[in-house]
Image (cartoon, grey):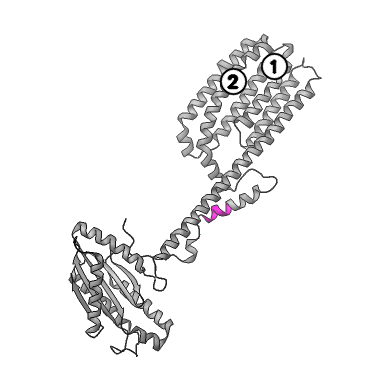
Amino acid sequence: MALPTRITLPPRQAIEPTGEVDRNEVATATVAFDRTLSWMRFPTALEQQFLSDSAQRRLIYFMLSALLSLFIFNGFLLVDYLMVPDVFELAIKVRLAWFTPFAVISLMLTWWCRQYLLQKGWHLVVEYLVLLSGVLAAACLAYILSSSHAPNSQYYHVGLMVVIVYGNLVQRLRFWYAVAFSLIVYCIHITGVLMVQSFNPRLIPPMVALIGATLIFTLMANYALERDERRQYLLSLRRKHLLKDLGDVQRRLQQLARVDSLTGLFNRRHFQEYLQQTWQRAQHDHAHVAIVMLDVDHFKQFNDRYGHPAGDQCLVQVAQAMQDSLRRPGDLVARYGGEEFIAVLPGADADTARKAAERIREAVTQLGLAHEASSTAATVTVSVGVSSCRAREHTREQDLIAAADSALYKAKRQGRNQVASLSL
């Protein structure tokens, strides 16, 4: 992969993690769940994300557990035969002819439409299906018991405990749906008990208390299970945010390791890596590669006269002028060291590279930076060395750099503020 030709560091605030709203909601939800009691609901956007992320897994679990529960539901025909033999035929009709076809059709439709349901964001469809199926199962049992005159039928009302366990613990309805479901089943139980005139009044309090205790205990377990699930979800989000933060920091450190902090150009290390890759591609394509090396004339005297802060500003402006003078997207400029700058021009022959170097020299001259200590001119000038060649197997990229360095010293020897070139 080719390295980028120029890097633009983001402002300090830009490297802050994205999704600030999500982070605030996660923080708010975490504080809420650290309390003794929680309302079992995240802020709106986070709640939707939570339901969406868990929807597919929850739908699959619902399908599997519903099939098993349907098998158990019909397995209670044996209990019907033992407890309410007088309405056993009715029990067969209710369980096998009414409830089972409805349940099977509902499950098949849900499975066939699962992608549509998930895409539309109908994440609570499972809760409604569980609630409806549980209420219907309770109603079926209540109807069977209300039709029976068997003496043992009044004891059979405890069978509603199984329905409550199914909704609250097996299917693990979301807590508030579990509360609604449990209250509906409890009302069905109380209504069924009160409507049976032959019901032993001494059994009513213990029956109501037994089903009520089952309701309370299963809701407590349901609450604890969902609380743990939601807390784990928050922890997973915080872990993702932390990993993203670490990734952002790592990327920024990698950027800083390749950038000169003063000029904002790439540093020597990055230049070497980019030149190596450019050279390898050029060898494969038998293409030209050019190097432009620049040195600020009499820069030590500039620092002595105007001070190092002014010298730093001078280097920044020279670097910008050099960067602006190179017009092709593949050209890369780097600070080579001190007052030296270097550029690699992929695909540039000697004439193209020399023209680019002349543009750079003229751009620096046009800056008009005063340099009274210079013996070359009254303003800051640069000497530029250029080398170019067609990449061949018996040459190396280091040879190209050495040639550009030689050309630079040639320009200095000839009087500075000029371009000298050397081809391999």
Residue under circle 1?
146
Query: How far is the residue under mark 2 from the one under mark 1?
Result: 22 Å
Side of 114 where 202 appears, left or right: right
**Is residue 152 positioned above or below 227 on the image?**
above
Mainly helix, strand or loop, the magenta region? helix
Regarding residue 107, the answer to whether it shows in the image is yes
Q: Nearer the viewer, residue 409 or 344?
A: 409
Task: Bin the neighbour count of mark 2 within 10 Å (Cα to Cα): few under 14, some 14-19, many 20 and up.
Answer: few
Specify the segment rendered in magenta: 16-25
* Residue 335: image location, x then y, percent: 35, 72
Residue, x 53% and y 45% (percent of image)? 49
Q: Which mark is residue 215?
A: none
* Residue 133: image location, x then y, percent: 59, 26
Mark closer to the chain start, 2 or 1: 2
Res 385 quadrant in image: bottom left
Q: Nearer the viewer, residue 96 or 293?
A: 293
Give the quadrant of the C terminus: bottom left
Camera-side mark, 2 or 1: 2
Identify which amino acid the numbered label 2 is placed on.
Answer: Ile
Identify which amino acid the numbered label 1 is placed on.
Answer: Ser
Residue under circle 2?
72
**Count of numbered circles in the view:** 2
Regarding residue 418, the answer to whether it shows in the image is no
